Amino acid sequence: MGNLAWWQKAVIYQIYPRSFADSNGDGIGDIPGIISKLDHLRDLGIDVIWLSPVYASPNEDNGYDISDYMSIHPDYGTMDDFEQLIREAKARGISVIMDLVINHTSTEHEWFQKSRQGIEPYKNYYYWSDTWAGTPNNWTGFFGGSCWEKDAVRGASYLHLFAPHQADLNYHEPKVFEEVERILRFWLEKGVRGFRCDVVNVLYKDNLANGKKKLVLTGSEHYLSLPGTHDILHKIHKILVGYDAFTVGETVFVDTKEANFLTLPEREELNMVFGFEHMEIDQIIVKWFHTKFHWDQFVKVLARWQKEVRWNTLYFENHDQPRSTSRFGSKQYPEASAKLLATLLLTLRGTPFIFEGQEIGMRNFDYGSMDEIRDVESLNIYGLLSKAHVPARLKWYMIRNVSRDNARTPMQWDDSAYAGFMENDDGAARPWLQVNSNYKEINVKAQQADPSSVLHYYKELIRFRKEQDDLLEGDFELLAGTARYTLYRRGRFYILLNHSDAPLKISAVRKLLPSEYQVAFSTHSKDAPSDAGAALSAKGASLAPWQAVILQS
Ligand code: ISL
Ligand code: CA
């Protein structure tokens, strides 16, 4: 195990603070709430938590629109609370990484407020149409529509690749990176061990000429993974080296080649990146055009990244994606599906990321209408669809399947009111986003008491993974990847997944397995009873629907 860095051996857990645990009954998750749940994470075997933004923010995009990078949003607590979180986590062997959102700031940030008034040194901190020839240009943004917003104060427009309240920072102005450096050091000095870097491969825009017209993201050739961005990442790397901290970049539209450019150790940029290719199997061009999910295509993409990228992140969920059990699993066997997905996540080569609630198999929201939706992206797209006179039923279908709110419903801790996410003494406050009504069946407390639960399975498999060099460092080889089943090898382990609603005869893959093997690990699910241990090695044995096994040669 000697060759891996600490963050390569780690299992990372993403917390979306607004939805995790509310300590003071205002309906909004907060830092004291997180502290109160650290034992759950320690018991699960988590080494690092990634905190989605907790900075001061008007919350147009739930904190991805920062108005002060060096303070904590009062909704989430105080700087003292944050420092206590670092200490309490450390006492449990857990490190904390922050979300670093430096492509854009909130338009409420002081820099923007001064920039719009032309006050130095902030005047050129953003991309303004009065300083760039040919602007506003024809670029289109990530949340749909134009990337330019008129500002009456300055009498010019500014660039925003995301929501209009998220103004893009101009890295042609050297002072902007000086600010970034101050922010990095501020948090590193507090004991933060790294950063998840938001949309970090679009930081540098080479020029602001019109882009080639495209169905999505017209203009992206002027900012996707350009040399100017690689330079910025190298500077960030230099700052972090002194702290034994790491970075994981959220990188949009990268292939395996670009992923390596961004992460190969000798290039001294990022440590790892989140690619999107495996998350795009069920969409046509944009996620709003939903199409059938195919397991063989999914595994093919994962296997290619396993082969071609030196060190991968492994993730099936985050705060922008629907729940994986609902999305990739079986309607008939959801519990078995959640365990099969856990097996895949934790036996591939790379650093696994678990999103809050994934460890209990939380599902997509069950809302009936737009009234419950809070996400700025869903609201924007709904508005655009309405303008285009898309029929109501179709609009709702598009939003329901892929809305980011699917993953953002409050964490389900127990079967009390609001799933134990918040105390509800006077009944006045409600969670900021509605709880999924399945919380009586799916919650942490119930699963703690049930040794056959999804939660226990995660716990046991995380422990097993940490003990097995072959699962950490072993090579990867895809042996079979069909619509019904997948077989791959990691070192001396063979992982067999039956991702179908029918049983799978082991004889189907017998010739791909070693002549002798033992069952090292197997899922067992109430919704699909299965054979275990010796019975699985017997001639004629079969896997139950959605059963996953780890065989050892
Ligand atoms: O979710 C997406 C589309 O539905 C992605 O395109 C997403 O916008 C993209 O991955 C960037 O995401 C990150 O930056 C956004 C923020 O809204 C997301 O929550 C964050 O993960 C802007 O800061
Ligand atoms: Ca609160």
Image: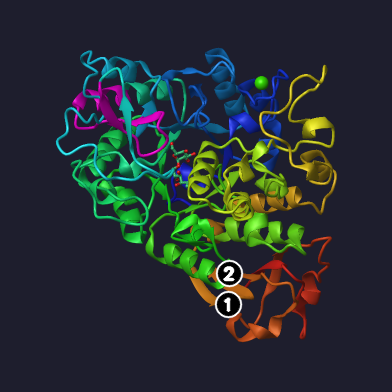
Q: Quadrant of the C terminus?
A: bottom right
Q: Is residue 271 above or below residue 67?
A: below
Instruction: Specify the segment rendered in magenta.
Output: 155-181
Residue nearer the viewer, 407 or 286? 286
Horizontally, residue 262 falls left or right of residue 100, namely left
Question: Relative to 230, does residue 127 appear above or below in the rendering?
Answer: above
Q: Quadrant of residue 44?
A: top right
Residue 481 shows up from this direction: yes
In the rendered structure, does residue 167 fall within the stretch colored magenta?
yes
Could you tell me which residue is drawn at 47 percent across and 43 percent down? 7
Can residue 475 be seen from the camera position used here? Answer: no
Label 2 close to label 1 by CB (< 8 Å): yes
Helix, strand, or loop for circle 2?
helix
Q: Indicate the secondary structure of the residue bearing disc 1.
A: loop
In the image, taking residue 542 as reference, residue 517 lies left or right, namely: left
Q: Vertical placement of 13 versus 112: above or below?
A: below
Residue occupied by mark 2: 295
Residue 126 position within the rendered picture, expressed as x and y whole percent measured from the top left = 27, 27
Furthest residue to the left? 133
Disc 1 residue crowd, few under 14, some 14–19, many 20+, Cα 10 Å? some
What residue does disc 1 label? 482
